[in-house]
Image (cartoon, rainbow, N blue to C red):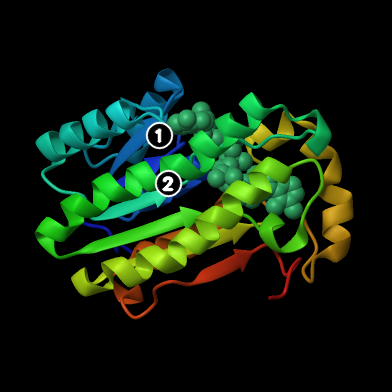
Amino acid sequence: MKRFTDRVAIVTGAAQGIGAAIARRLGEEGATVVVADVNEKAAAKVAKACGNGSFAVATDVGDAGQVKRLHETVVKRAGKIDVLVNNAAIVPFQPWDQVDFDHWRQIMRVNLDGVFLMSRASSDAMRKTGYGRIVNICSNTIFAGTPNMAAYVAAKGGVFGFTRALATELGAYRITVNAVCPGLTASEGVMASPHAKAFEFVEMLQAIKGHGKPDDIAPAVAFLASEEAQWITGQTVNVDAGMVRW
Ligand code: NAD
Ligand code: 4PL
């Protein structure tokens, strides 16, 4: 399939993990991918693998000034923005009463404020061309109430609600806004954290057995980001081997 020929897609947090798998998939299907991540070196590597003149822009999605500069760069270099995938996030593992207020704020800043800032700037560009797809990477923890991630679950609950509201606001421009909720997935970040020990428990809850991989998440994102998903907006879909049925 080549659903993204001549399309420009920004994928945040795409230097590794789920974001990198999404970026590579969109690239394989012809997109010029903008890899926006705080990890500049790894982002540049992923952009190179995406082809089609893809490039990396060092960006902290929680910083309004950096998000503005990112969008100026993309419009200058690629001319437009067709697809935004809000994937960048901090994935913590910490009992909730050990999370101090600064840490709580930092998670909100990246995981929720970042989605607002990126969606605001990208949708302004999309409104100019009359085409746009926004896909927010949420998490099935919003349905499960997974332990050791209270601030994260709160922020992702915000992303879930924001997805619905933004779909309403942007419907007038035929821009769609949807969310994908992965379950536990073997990204670099997760494998280097205590989450790596949870696969067996999570597998017990799954309808389909096995361990989730970044490449298992990318196809759903690519579909929602494609032209043919034009009649789907404001929706949230779990991609978690049936761990949560909602
Ligand atoms: P990861 O930790 O492996 O990668 C996250 C990437 O985001 C890194 O490249 C990091 O540099 C980047 N990043 C962090 N803060 C940033 C910032 N302020 N600005 C820009 N980039 C930033 O994570 P992952 O497991 O691949 O997760 C990707 C997405 O999937 C996240 O939204 C996460 O919440 C979601 N998710 C992951 C799982 C899982 O089990 N892996 C499950 C459900 C949802
Ligand atoms: C089920 O979003 O969805 C652990 C870590 N377990 O980040 C997640 C589950 C994690 C998840 C997530």
Mark 2 or mark 1, which has the lower sequence index? 1
On-image quarter of the N terminus: bottom left
Residue denoted by label 1: 61
In x, y percent, where is residue 175? 26, 67
Q: Quadrant of residue 33?
A: top left
In x, y percent, where is residue 158? 54, 54
Disc 1 C-beta below 8 A from ligand 1: yes
Residue that appears at 58% across and 35% down: 107
- The number of callouts visible is 2
Q: Tell me the amino acid under the disc marked 1.
A: Val
2 and 1 marks in contact (CB < 8 Å): yes
Residue denoted by label 2: 115
Q: Is residue 3 left or right of residue 162?
A: left
> Is residue 177 something that shows in the picture?
no
> Is residue 225 something that shows in the picture?
yes
Q: Residue furthest bottom?
A: 231
> In what element is the residue under mark 1?
loop
